[in-house]
Image: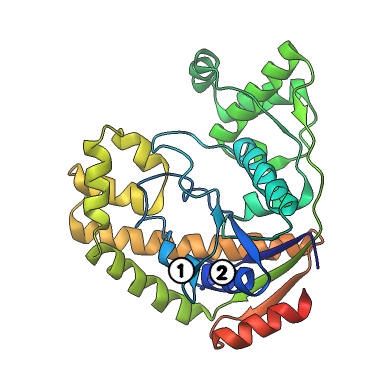
Amino acid sequence: MKPLITVLGPTASGKTALAVQLAYRLDGEVVSADSRQVYRRMDIGTGKDLSEYTVNDRPIPYHLIDIREPGDKYTLFNYQHDFHRAYEDILARGKQPVLCGGTGLYIESVLKGYDLPDVPRNPELRTALEQRSLDELSELLSSYRPLHNTTDTKNKRRVIRAIEIEVYKSQQGDVETTFPAIESVIVGLMIDREVRRTNITARLRARLQGGMIKEVEQLLTSGVAPNDLIYYGLEYKFVTQHVIGELSREEMYRKLEIAIHQFAKRQMTWFRGMERRGFTIHWIDASLPMEQKVQQALSWV
């Protein structure tokens, strides 16, 4: 048995159901790798589908869902720490950890053991940097370190964050935390593009009918700022814009549907990138019956 089994796939591919089935067969527990399911009361828009975590009347334990309040900024650094606490706890009890999600960065960060600095936000520095052009910011960043990662210099927000980290490190000294890489069997769900699009559209309609707008209204009423919900993107961005009067329902639906399709495409691009970076992903046809998917996955474990 591997120390970790990972189930990944784009949105609407059925990865949670497969991960739960594997945990059921292997006496395991599921660890979520979803950047938004960490938030309480954000249930419909994030697709928690907590009812799926029961098989034959047996609840399957899950971790890193409903651990933060809406409005919190949950970072990759936070996720790494939370993951390792859950992972070590599951192993200590002799259970099989099953990592499941569609946030590729979260998955790759724990499998590879990313080194990340725990750097707080610096509002004063950010305000000052916002006045500078992207070229000026890139030049400033290059004065701190070689620009090996060109993605840092293509987005102003990324450059400002990178400078913020370098300034903090120069003032505080070494702030890096090293996590070990983890060996894992990685199972990916491959879904036909048109089927995926159909599933996404059907699921969006079901979520809207199931109370997603009301969920956002309740979050806003509870004191969560509109900009905080918009920050979380996708459903929470566009539904919030609709609720506060910036978008009609028709505009909200159209823009949100397009955004989710684009998001699913980006997820697959990330997973393909993982393969290029040396990860072996065992792909399974998402349209197969569940028992066939489970048996295929078990053959690799």
Which quadrant of the structure image shows residue 60? Answer: bottom right
Neighbor class of circle 1 (other Cα within 10 Å; few <14, some 14-19, many 20+) is some
Q: Position of residue 80 (x, y in %)?
A: 66, 41
- Residue 109 in sight in this render: no
Which of pointers 1 and 2 lies earlier in the amino acid sequence?
2
**Image quarter hosting the C terminus:** bottom right
Distance Cα–Cα, label 1 vs label 2: 7 Å
Image vertical order of residue 103 relative to residue 142, above or below: below
Residue 20: image tag? 2
Pointers 1 and 2 in contact (C-beta within 8 Å): yes
Mark 2 secondary-structure assignment: helix
Looking at the image, which is closer to me, 14 or 197? 14
Quickly name the residue at label 1.
Answer: 52
Residue 142: which disc?
none
The front one of 193 and 71 is 71
Kind of residue indicated by mark 1 = Glu
Say what amino acid the circle numbered 2 marks: Val
Check the image and report above or below for 175 versus 299: above
Q: Position of residue 92 (x, y in %)?
A: 74, 50
Residue at (29, 63) in percent of width and height: 254
Q: Which element type, helix, strand or loop, lies under badge 1?
A: helix
Give the quadrant of the N terminus: bottom right
- Residue appearing at x 79%, y 20% in the figure: 174
Q: Relative to residue 165, is residue 241 drawn left or right?
A: left
Identify the residue at horizontal 23%, vertical 54% (top origin): 213
